[in-house]
Each structure stands twice: as structure tokens, then as C-alpha cells.
Image: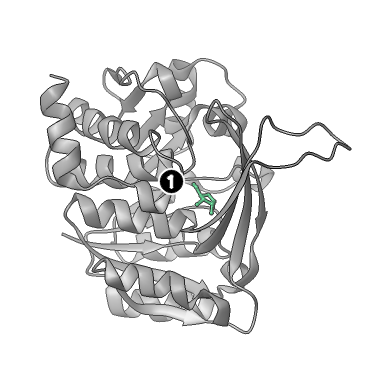
Amino acid sequence: MKILVFGSFNIDKVYSMPRLPERGETLYCRGYEVHVGGKGLNQALAFSYAGADVIAAGKVGADGRYLTDYLEKNNIDISEIDYSGEYTGHTIIETDPDGQNQMILFGGANREITREYCDALLAKHSGADLILMQYETTCVEYMLEKARSLGLKTALNPSPYVDELRSIDYSNADILILNEYEAQSVTGRESPEDCVKALRELGSRVIILTLGAKGSVYYDGGEPVYCPAFRVNAVDTTGAGDTFTGYCLYELLAGAPPYDALRFGSAASALEVAKPGAAETIPSRAEVESFLEKNR
Ligand code: RIB
């Protein structure tokens, strides 16, 4: 299975806090670490660990070589990642002892994607099985429309939520994979049932909605399929959605029934949140399979 992951590559600067700071407050952190990250990088890794051949596409600055080295070391094709004169994107992530976080995102090179870049990428890779994208780079809407017009299957993770996402053309997304907050923000609806139906009315054919501790839902216009979450002690939820996305989509594309694909994605993200970090804590396929075996 050949997957094109078009997305962001960030340096994650992670601060462990005794609690998240209030407005105007200065707080000492308990620890500081630098990790590889970005939704594109995390999803590329998760898809690859699940079993796909992944081509990563996007932009980094000269300070981002260690991100591309990390991807390459993990068997991801980095030949479509361009270098830009801008700094690499970075994220300041504050985590609290309950595993909750808040982030500041600097887009950097991720925001330098041009239509020309998208055209050149698609000219070479329109034969892939899927293009997966998130919302941290520029030109996402253009890429979606263009990819679909070339007959390439598209998956969009509209994350992080920005107001522009209320008005994009969702009919260009074959699969929409998002969390509850994003779904509520896009649709203005409250319940998961109302959200998935409203998202389908906006044009996406398949909706996959994650609900944190409440599990996940798959909806393609038939009966919604619900899957409960695994109960885990979350240490750091950064990257949980990306891990779910890569594993769940791989399983679906490989022909698994929706419930099984949701369960696979949930198991992978349950393992990911049990350790601090994002990309480096995405579990291997063997770890996910063994977790599922133990939790049958
Ligand atoms: O989804 C998690 C990712 O979001 C982090 O790695 C961070 O870089 C932000 O992009």
C-alpha cells in the first residue's frame, strides 16, 4: 500500500508543568525535552509502522534536517520533502501531570507550501493509494481539490481547528478523520450523532470521529459504528490522534471492517498516550497486536 502523507514537520519543545499556567502567570517547569513532531511526521510514522509504504511530503528549514533523518531512519521516503529558507515549524507544548496539554504552534516552513509544489508532487504520485493531509500547512484545500480531480483518494484530518475550516469544500475529502472538538467547531452541532451526519451532509463520504475516553465512531451514511476506548493511564496525549489516524486508516484501506479498524487505531493510541512524547512513542505494529491480544 503506497501512502502519500502531505503535512507538517515540527520540532516539539515539551515542558512538563506542575499544572498549566494561568493568564499572566509565570511558572517553573519540572522538565524540558525536544522531540520530533508535527502532525504530518507523526501520521507518516504511524501509517508506516502499521505496514504502509509512506512518502512524506512538505517543507522544513535548514534546522529541520534531524526531522528528515528521523523519518528516513524509520523507512519513510523523504525525497519529496523540500528545504525552505524559513525556520522549521515548531511547537511549544506544556503538559500537566494528568496528561493534558496546551500548545503554541509556529508554522515556519510548513506555511511555505505553494500550489506549484502541490502540482509537482501530484504529477509524480497520483497513483498512490491515498493522500493524507492535516491542517498545519498552506494549500491544503488546493491539494485536496487537485488530488481528487486526478482520481487520488483523499483523507483529511482537519486539525488543528481554524475558522477557515467552516467553509472549505468537504466533498473533496473521501475520508474525514477528526476529534469531537473539531467536529463540533466545524458543524456547530453537539452530539457525535449530529456531528457525523452534518459532516456527511457537507460532502465527505466517510467520517471517523474520535471521542477521547468515549471511544470512536465510523459513519458512511449507514448505521454509525461505535467502538469503545481502552482504559489507560494517560501520561501525555500529544500525538494520540495522529497515531489513531495512521493505524485506523491503514486497517480500513487494507480491508478491515470499520469496527476492527477503529479498535486497532484505539489500541495504538492507548499505547501512545502511556508514555511522554509524540512521534517517539508511537507503538510498533507488533506492540499493538500484542495489546489487542491481551485485551480481547
Ligand atoms: O498532533 C500532535 C502534533 O501537533 C505535535 O507533534 C505538534 O508538533 C503539533 O503539530
Along the line of sight, which residue is nearer the eye, 104 or 273? 273
Write down the quadrant of residue 95 in the picture.
top right
> For the point 46% across and 19% down, which residue is it?
192
- Residue 211, visible in the rendered structure: no
The image quarter in which residue 153 lies: bottom left
Q: Which residue is mark 1?
A: 171
Assess disc 1: are there few (<14), some (14-19) or many (≥20) residues with their C-alpha within 10 Å of its C-alpha: some
Which part of the image, by quadrant, shows the C terminus? Answer: top left
Pointer 1 residue Cβ closer than 8 Å to ligand 1: no
Residue at the image point whose x is 32% and y is 57% from the top: 45
Task: Report the residue at 36% width, 59% height from top.
Answer: 148
**Residue 119 visible, this angle:** yes
Left or right of residue 11: residue 150 = left
Residue 142, percent across and down? 51, 64
Q: Secondary structure at mark 1?
A: helix
Q: Residue at x 16, y 28 (%)?
A: 292
Amino acid type indicated by mark 1 = Ser
Residue 21, percent from left and from top? 76, 34
Task: Indicate the position of residue 26 as horizontal and vertical percent values.
Answer: 83, 40
Question: Is 112 displayed left or right of 172 in the figure?
Answer: right
